Image (cartoon, grey):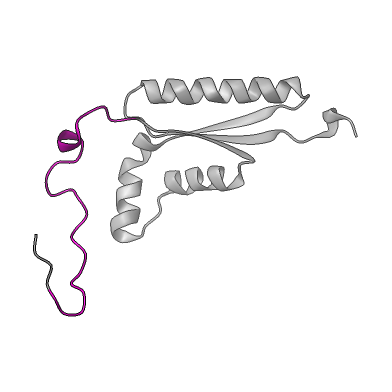
Amino acid sequence: MSTAAWSPVALAVVSAGVGRPGPTRLLADRVAEAVCRALAAGGARADVEVVELHRLAVDLAHHTTHGRVGLDLREAIAAVVAADGLVVATPVVAAPHAQAAPPGSAAPPPPPVRGRHRTA
């Protein structure tokens, strides 16, 4: 079978950065370009769908708090589910632990074991 008969590869690129365009999106684009070049070298092509999470922040909050899925979020989920390949880029926080996770943001203590309360 010739590669010309192949369907394009669906590639979803998810960027979780907050800048416009930020380094996270630029990284996602570079990785996606490398994937497309590798596919092209093998005779295939990719249809790329980019999902930027910062644009879905309100929809994600509504889904988390009320269980509602807006149209934009539904389309993003569909793109990821239907994809043959996935590129995900997330930012890295370069800060000491105390600054990256302020007090009160840590996980709550485990529940008491066998009726005994844990003391710190």
Give the residue at the far right of this rendering. Answer: 1
On screen, residue 64 above or below 33: below
Magenta residues (range): 92-116
Tell me the residue at 30%/60% (across/down): 66
Give the residue at the far left of this rendering. Answer: 119
Q: Position of residue 92 (x, y in %)?
A: 33, 30
On screen, residue 107 above or below 85: below
Tell me the residue at 19%/58% (across/down): 108
Q: Is residue 111 magenta?
A: yes
Residue 115 at least partly seen: yes
Tell me the residue at 60%/34% (across/down): 11
Give the total number of marks visible in the rendering: 0
Q: Position of residue 49 (x, y in %)?
A: 55, 33
Would you say the magenta stretch is mainly helix, strand or loop?
loop
The quadrant in which residue 117 appears is bottom left
Which quadrant does the C terminus fall into? bottom left
On screen, residue 57 above or below 49: below
Locate residue 38 relative to residue 113 in the image: left or right. Answer: right
Nearest the camera: 100 or 27?
A: 100
Q: Position of residue 35 (x, y in %)?
A: 62, 25
